[in-house]
Amino acid sequence: MFPVTGRRSGGEAPTSLATKALTILASFTPERPRLTLSELARESGLALTTTHRVVGDLLAWGALERGSDGAYQIGLRLWETASLAPRGTPLREVALPYMEDLYEATHENVQLAVREDLEVVYVERLTGRGAVRVLTRVGGRFALHATGVGLVLLAHAPTDVQEEALAGPLRRWTDLTITDPARLRAVLAEVRRTGVAVSDRQVTVDALSVACPVHGRGDRVLAALSVVVHADTPVHAVRPAVQAAARGMSRALGAPSALRRPEGIRPRPSRPRSGRSGEEPPL
Amino acid sequence: MFPVTGRRSGGEAPTSLATKALTILASFTPERPRLTLSELARESGLALTTTHRVVGDLLAWGALERGSDGAYQIGLRLWETASLAPRGTPLREVALPYMEDLYEATHENVQLAVREDLEVVYVERLTGRGAVRVLTRVGGRFALHATGVGLVLLAHAPTDVQEEALAGPLRRWTDLTITDPARLRAVLAEVRRTGVAVSDRQVTVDALSVACPVHGRGDRVLAALSVVVHADTPVHAVRPAVQAAARGMSRALGAPSALRRPEGIRPRPSRPRSGRSGEEPPL
């Protein structure tokens, strides 16, 4: 859907200047957030003169900045513009209070993620200081088939996306990572049935994550919410809190299923028309 | 420094395709985060055919997405790339735990902002549900001369930036907004001297903000941290918490002044070489 232009594939150089500008922006990575002009030319596969010209445009607009050492970095103006991406900052703004509630209740890692193609993108993360180590960062990506949020997002992805993901390659992080497509298919069906995904030491040997879908209008799955805890924590100690927070978010996002009263709640008895109201307990 | 290209100024159309792509991105605003092709052409001042072509490039790369109604919106891929802006998400990642501490201690609005040209850009904001209303949003901008964070950032800006800001126009939000350059100059000197800025009902009639600078390497002021409270809250009830959190952030960012032991702390008496150690209280 979105071609990967961050790295040259097959040596084809991008053609339009607009695409060249985007290719230069995509040269920056979490590992290399600051690059010199020649590094930008090398990473983008563009001629040095073209790079120089496009970088000039990007700099003038504020999409790039120069750090105190003269190296280029992504500019605050681009960050501001990009903060309008509906699946980024605005989603996060709605979700954050519920994530904070969840953090306050657990003091563990709380994560919110969306799907982009065959990967998870982390939109927000709250990390407790004593919480178990996780491999993710805000704005970072991860495979769909291993984490709790990934399993939720994969379970609710269109069929063609699921088939493409199951066709692999399915990377193994630990001995418990599920890399067998048939087993993964069964897990996804279970996630859809129960509304909860559990990734038990499937990414790191000491972490377990419990994730639930976050729904929006029309009950579409927009995102997944998870708590990542030490692997010795029982799932039932975390699951209700994640479910409740995900439902709160879904309601805030206008999901019909989260606006309905849950089934099985016994209605409060109506006040008797006559008689000893003095016997009723105060509210 | 960064020309405003979001709105046509003087009718000049951008020249290079790279700049055209950026101009199209800048057409999106918090008020209008979703635009049709013809709206994009109108906002950017580009011909419809050019807009169509550049939007195609942006869409293919993932800088734009189409919503369920077919309208264009900023894409998650751009949000991911832009999250590498050092003054955006990475600064926020360091700051967030301290902001959460401050929120937990006050349950009021906690804000982190940086300066871009003559404006404040809000990088992070935590909002208590019962907290006083504020006019800001993450990724949004505000004038330098009225808010607590703005006064901190203006007080520590280069002289030419200060002069440009003081030359105005200085917008008035309330009767208490300071719009007299001489008075503002005195306030800025006081902010530098005390390390604290107070904006008392200078933006809205019911809010007061207390802000402190956040320092980085070489003790450069990188950002400002504030708490916004109801105007009837005494400043001294908020100031120490803001100062402590800002110092914690500065230390995490490697600021020398925040790594030194504060002056005036009495050293713990060293253990006596001989004698009745049994009389000492256990540690």
Image (cartoon, coloured by chain):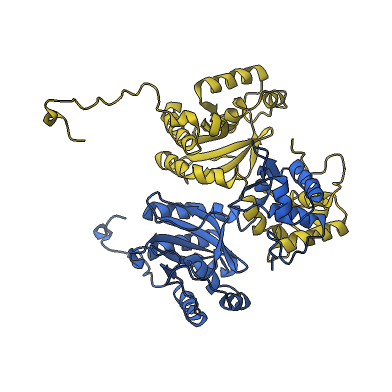
Chain colours: A blue, B yellow
Q: Position of residue B182 (x, y in %)?
A: 65, 16
In the rendered image, the vertical position of residue B261 relative to residue B132, given as above or below: above
In the rendered image, the vertical position of residue A103 relative to residue A257, given as above or below: above
In the rendered image, the vertical position of residue B132 relative to residue B168, given as above or below: below
Q: Residue at x 68, y 63 (%)?
A: A4
Which of the 4 image quadrants contains residue A66? top right
Q: Position of residue B23 (x, y in %)?
A: 78, 49
Q: Is residue A30 visible?
A: yes
Q: Quadrant of the C terminus of chain B?
A: top left
Which of the 4 image quadrants contains residue A272? bottom left
- Foreground residue among A124 and B145: A124
- Foreground residue among B228 and B2: B2
Q: Position of residue B8 (x, y in %)?
A: 82, 43
Q: Residue at x 86, y 39 (%)?
A: B10
Q: Residue at x 74, y 38 (%)?
A: B2
Q: Residue at x 42, y 62 (%)?
A: A242
- Foreground residue among A239 and A230: A230
Q: Is residue A273 visible?
A: no
Q: Quadrant of the N terminus of chain B?
A: top right
Instruction: Answer left or right for A80 relative to A151.
Output: right
Q: Residue furthest bottom?
A: A182
In the rendered image, the vertical position of residue B71 relative to residue A126, given as above or below: below
- Foreground residue among B78 and B65: B78
Q: Position of residue A260 (x, y in %)?
A: 49, 67
